[in-house]
C-alpha cells in the first residue's frame, strides 16, 4: 500500500466535492479513476500531491497517508511530497523553454547545477519516454515546436527527471489523437515497472486497457473500487454497471 | 420619416469613415515627424552632436544635453524598473485578488493620469529642497522614476497575470517553491510584456520636459556626477524655442530627440521579438 485515504472529505467553500473517500492504492500498479465529468476524480487526484492547496477556500477533513505518513499533518514537507508524487496534466504544457531546459527545470529547482549531471538526467529522462533518439540533436530548440504527443512525452520526461515514486495522470491523453494515445498507453505500461501510476480518465476503454485496479466515482463518492476485471465484467453496484454500459455519463 | 440606406451602402459608408479616421491618425503622426525632420535634419551634423553648447545655445552643439538626457533617463529606469517589477510580482503573486489589489491598481492608474508638471513640483519640493539634492541628475532621475513607476507596475502586472496558471502548477508539481516559480517560470514568460512597459517608461522619461526642468535644472555644463545640474534635450529644445534663442537649433535638437526615441523603440522591439521568437 503506497497511498491510503481514510474518511476523506473535501469542500470548495460550501460545496462538498469529495464525500467520505476510503481507498488504497497499491505500489507498482496502474490505478484508474473513472466517472462522469464533475464527479470529483480530478479533485481526488489533486489531493494526493496537495495541488488543491493552491485554490482558495478548500477545506479537507479525514486523512491521506503516503508511505504511512499523513500528508495533511501540519509538519509534513509539501515540497518533498510533490517531488515524490509527480503530476502529468491534461494538456501537454511544456514551458516556453528549450527541450533541455524543460527537463532540467526540476533538477535545477532541487539545486542541481552540474552540467554533466544535468546532461545525464536529460538523456536518461528522454530515453525513458522513448524520445531521446528523436530529439538528441534538438535539445536546444523550443519545446513548443513539438507535436502534442511528443510534448506530453516531454512533460512525462520532465517529471521523471526529479525521480518521483508516484505518477498522477490527469486525463493525460484527452488532448491527443487515438494513435498518440495508444503510444502514451504503451509508455505507461513500461513506466509501471518502476512507478506507481494513478490515472484519471473519462475514457472507459482506456481504463479497461491499462488499469490494474479501478475506482468508479459519482457525485463525489467512491462508489466501487476493485480490480479492473471485476469492475468491467461483474460490478457489484448497479450505478457502476449503468455507467460502464453507457447508460449515463 | 426616417432616412434609410441599404446594407451595402451602409458598409461602404462605414468602411470609408473608418478609413478616413485611420488616414488622419497616420497623417498627423507623419506630418509632425516629417515637419520636424525637414526643419531640423539639415542642421544636424557630427559636430552638432559632439560639441559643447556655446552662447546659450545659439551656437555650438548639444553634447551636454545628450549626456544629461542619457544619465537622467538611465537613473530613472535603474530605479523604477526593479521597484516596478517587484511591486507587480508582489501584487499578483502574494496578494489575493480583491479590494486591496484593486485599490493599488486604481491608485497606479490615477498616478498615470497626473500631469507631469505635478511630478516636477513634487520632485522640486521633495528631492531638490527637502532632501537637498539640488538641481541635479539625481533629483531629475528620481522624479522621473516616480513618474514612470505606475506605467511599469501596471504593464508588468498585466504581463504577469497572463502567464498561464498551468505553468505555475507544473512548477509546483515538480517541487518548485514560490520563489523558484516566480524567478524561473513566471518572470521569463512575462518578460516581453514587462520589457514593453519598461520601453514605454523610457519613452516617457526621455521626452519629459516639465518634470525635469524643475528638478534636473537647465545648466549647460557637462554633467560629471549625479549631483551635477543638467539640461535634458527636451528642456534644451523648450528653452531655445520659448526664449527665441535659435529656432534652427531648436528644430535640430527636436530632430535628435525624435531619432533617439524612434531608435530606442526600434531596438527594444527587435530585442523583444528576438526573445519571443527564441522559444515561442
Image (cartoon, rainbow, N blue to C red):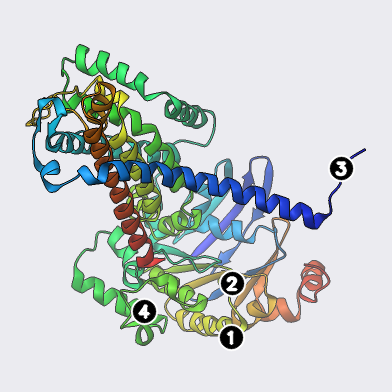
Q: Residue at x 64, y 40 (%)?
A: A13
Badges 4 and 3: C-beta atoms under 8 Å apart?
no
- In the foreground, B76 or B100: B76
- Density class for disc 3 (Cα within 10 Å; few <14, some 14-19, many ≥20) is few
Q: Residue at x 52, y 31 (%)?
A: B102
Give the answer, above or below, for where B174 lies relative to B13.
below
Q: Residue at x 25, y 46 (%)?
A: B41
Q: Position of residue A91 (x, y in %)?
A: 54, 67
| Secondary structure found at label 1 | helix
Q: Chain of mark 2?
A: A
Is residue B57 visible in this depiction of the protein?
yes
Compute the Cα span from label 1 to label 3.
61 Å
Q: Quadrant of the N terminus of chain B?
A: top right
Q: Which residue is mark 4?
A: A126
Q: Chain of mark 1?
A: A
Compute the Cα span from label 2 to label 4.
21 Å
- In the rendered structure, find residue A189 and report the number of the disc placed on it: none
| Secondary structure found at label 4 | helix
- In the rendered structure, find residue A175 and report the number of the disc placed on it: 2
| Secondary structure found at label 2 | loop
Q: Chain of mark 3?
A: B
Q: Position of residue A177 (x, y in %)?
A: 60, 80
Compute the Cα span from label 1 to label 2.
12 Å
Same-chain status of marks 4 and 1: yes
- In the rendered structure, find residue A179 and report the number of the disc placed on it: 1
- Density class for disc 1 (Cα within 10 Å; few <14, some 14-19, many ≥20) is few
Q: Quadrant of residue A115?
A: bottom left
Compute the Cα span from label 4 to label 3.
70 Å
Q: Earlier in the sequence, mark 4 or mark 1?
A: 4
Q: Residue at x 80, y 76 (%)?
A: A245
Badges 2 and 4: C-beta atoms under 8 Å apart?
no
Amino acid at each position: 500500500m503506497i497511498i491510503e485515504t481514510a474518511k476523506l472529505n473535501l469542500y470548495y467553500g460550501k460545496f462538498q466535492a469529495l464525500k467520505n473517500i476510503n481507498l488504497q492504492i497499491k505500489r507498482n500498479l496502474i490505478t484508474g479513476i473513472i466517472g462522469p465529468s464533475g464527479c470529483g476524480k480530478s479533485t481526488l487526484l489533486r489531493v494526493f500531491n496537495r495541488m488543491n492547496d493552491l485554490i482558495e477556500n478548500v477545506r479537507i477533513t479525514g486523512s491521506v497517508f503516503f508511505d504511512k505518513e499523513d500528508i495533511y499533518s501540519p509538519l509534513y514537507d509539501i515540497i518533498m511530497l510533490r517531488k515524490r508524487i509527480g503530476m502529468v496534466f491534461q494538456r501537454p504544457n511544456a514551458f516556453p523553454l528549450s527541450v533541455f531546459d524543460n527537463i532540467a527545470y526540476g533538477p535545477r529547482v532541487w539545486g542541481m547545477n552540474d552540467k554533466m549531471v544535468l546532461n545525464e538526467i536529460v538523456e536518461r529522462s528522454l530515453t525513458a519516454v522513448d524520445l531521446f533518439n528523436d530529439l538528441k540533436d534538438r535539445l536546444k530548440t523550443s519545446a513548443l515546436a513539438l507535436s502534442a504527443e511528443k510534448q506530453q512525452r516531454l512533460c512525462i520526461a520532465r517529471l521523471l527527471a526529479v525521480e518521483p515514486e508516484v505518477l498522477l495522470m490527469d486525463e493525460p491523453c484527452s488532448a491527443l489523437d487515438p494513435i498518440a494515445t495508444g503510444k502514451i498507453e504503451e509508455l505507461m505500461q513500461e513506466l509501471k515497472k518502476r512507478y506507481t501510476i494513478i490515472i484519471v480518465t473519462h475514457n472507459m476503454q482506456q481504463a479497461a486497457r491499462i488499469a490494474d485496479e479501478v475506482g468508479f466515482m459519482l457525485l463525489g463518492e467512491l462508489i466501487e473500487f476493485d480490480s479492473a476485471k471485476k469492475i468491467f465484467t461483474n460490478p457489484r453496484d448497479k450505478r457502476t454497471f449503468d455507467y460502464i454500459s453507457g447508460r449515463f455519463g | 420619416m426616417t432616412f434609410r440606406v441599404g446594407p451595402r451602402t451602409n458598409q461602404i459608408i462605414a468602411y470609408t469613415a473608418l478609413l478616413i479616421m485611420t488616414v488622419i491618425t497616420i497623417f498627423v503622426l507623419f506630418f509632425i515627424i516629417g515637419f520636424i525632420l525637414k526643419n531640423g535634419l539639415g542642421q544636424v551634423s557630427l559636430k552638432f552632436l559632439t560639441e559643447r553648447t556655446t552662447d546659450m545655445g545659439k551656437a555650438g552643439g548639444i553634447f551636454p544635453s545628450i549626456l544629461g538626457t542619457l544619465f537622467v533617463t538611465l537613473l530613472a529606469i535603474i530605479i523604477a524598473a526593479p521597484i516596478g517589477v517587484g511591486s507587480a510580482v508582489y501584487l499578483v503573486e502574494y496578494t489575493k485578488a480583491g479590494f486591496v489589489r484593486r485599490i493599488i491598481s486604481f491608485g497606479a492608474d490615477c498616478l498615470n493620469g497626473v500631469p507631469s508638471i505635478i511630478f516636477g513640483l513634487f520632485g522640486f519640493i521633495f528631492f531638490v529642497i527637502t532632501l537637498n539634492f539640488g538641481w541635479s541628475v539625481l533629483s531629475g532621475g528620481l522624479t522621473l522614476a516616480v513618474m514612470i513607476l505606475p506605467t511599469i507596475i501596471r504593464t508588468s502586472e498585466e504581463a504577469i497575470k497572463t502567464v498561464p496558471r498551468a505553468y505555475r502548477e507544473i512548477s509546483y508539481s515538480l517541487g518548485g517553491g514560490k520563489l523558484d516559480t516566480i524567478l524561473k517560470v513566471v518572470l521569463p514568460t512575462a518578460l516581453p510584456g514587462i520589457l514593453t512597459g519598461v520601453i514605454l517608461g523610457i519613452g516617457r522619461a526621455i521626452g519629459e520636459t516639465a518634470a525635469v526642468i524643475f528638478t534636473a535644472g537647465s545648466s549647460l555644463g557637462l554633467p560629471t556626477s549625479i549631483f551635477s545640474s543638467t539640461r535634458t534635450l527636451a528642456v534644451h529644445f523648450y528653452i531655445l524655442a520659448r526664449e527665441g534663442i535659435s529656432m534652427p537649433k531648436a528644430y535640430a535638437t527636436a530632430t535628435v530627440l525624435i531619432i533617439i526615441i524612434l531608435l530606442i523603440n526600434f531596438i527594444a522591439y527587435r530585442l523583444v521579438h528576438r526573445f519571443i521568437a527564441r522559444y515561442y
